[in-house]
Amino acid sequence: QIKPGGTLLINHTADPSVVAAAPVGTRVIRYGLTAGQGPELFASNIFAEGHQFHFNLHGPEGTINNLELAVPGYHNVENMLAAAAVAQIQGVGREQLRAAVAAYQGVKRRFEFVVTTAQNVYLDDYAHHPREIEAFLHSVRALYPHKRLRVIFQPHLFTRTRDFAAGFSKSLSIADEVFLLDIYPAREQPLPGITSEIILANITSPTKAILTKEQVLSAARTDDSFDVLATVGAGDIDTLVPQLKLILMERWK
């Protein structure tokens, strides 16, 4: 549905068939987080400071240095590259774009700070694919490099768990502690042999377990081993967020 002479911005990891389906004459701009990934649109000098991520934007429409993104996360930087490029193509000026990036406050369940104290943090994120989880957890590590990180993850769909089990195990192993909930089925029926166990088996974190939601809440009430908590997933794990918030606000006050 791209108009004649229009532009397609597409992540550099997208299947080539997507670009092949674009109308003849379409301008294609591939974007990725860094120049090393080979895209025309990328970021450089990415670093975390406080809750912000700073970066330089490089693309066909020019370079803008020292953009400040208030919503942290490498995945959010990558998303902002595409959004900023669209703004540039539409003629938004450099300083106006810089102000807009700084003003962006994000969306619910994308690197959402639920509880923040001087020593502890509770984050919630919708990530439900290994690449998203990896980007999110690397970003948390960049913000809190010396903190002990506990992640609670709810796999979403039996087919996705089957297809990406190894990727989930690898990405979740970035954390010090990993607690898995049972798979959220959504529209699917169970598949034989496909449970959270196939992810748990290959996680290399020192602490790992499969817990019920009540056990997750109990661990939050009684266990002081973590500094940063993250709930991750696209199912109904968000129903735990208000309960965990109350527990941790009381414990960390």
Image: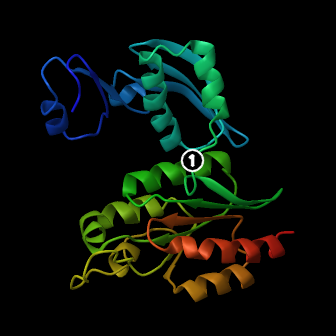
Q: Which residue is mark 1?
A: 139
Report the label total: 1
| Left or right placement of residue 242 versus residue 83 in this view | right
- Expressed as whole percent of the image width and height from the top left, the position of residue 31 reads 36, 29
Location of residue 251 by image quarter: bottom right
Residue visible at 20% across and 19% down in the picture: 4
Q: Quadrant of the C terminus?
A: bottom right
Residue visible at 45% across and 68% down in the picture: 204
Residue visible at 44% across and 71% down in the picture: 235
Q: Is residue 1 above or below residue 124?
A: above
- Expressed as whole percent of the image width and height from the top left, the position of residue 160 reads 28, 66
| Left or right placement of residue 157 versus residue 4 in this view | right
Q: Nearer the viewer, residue 215 or 101?
A: 101
Q: Is residue 67 above or below residue 215?
A: above
Location of residue 22 by image quarter: top left
- Expressed as whole percent of the image width and height from the top left, the position of residue 139 reads 57, 47
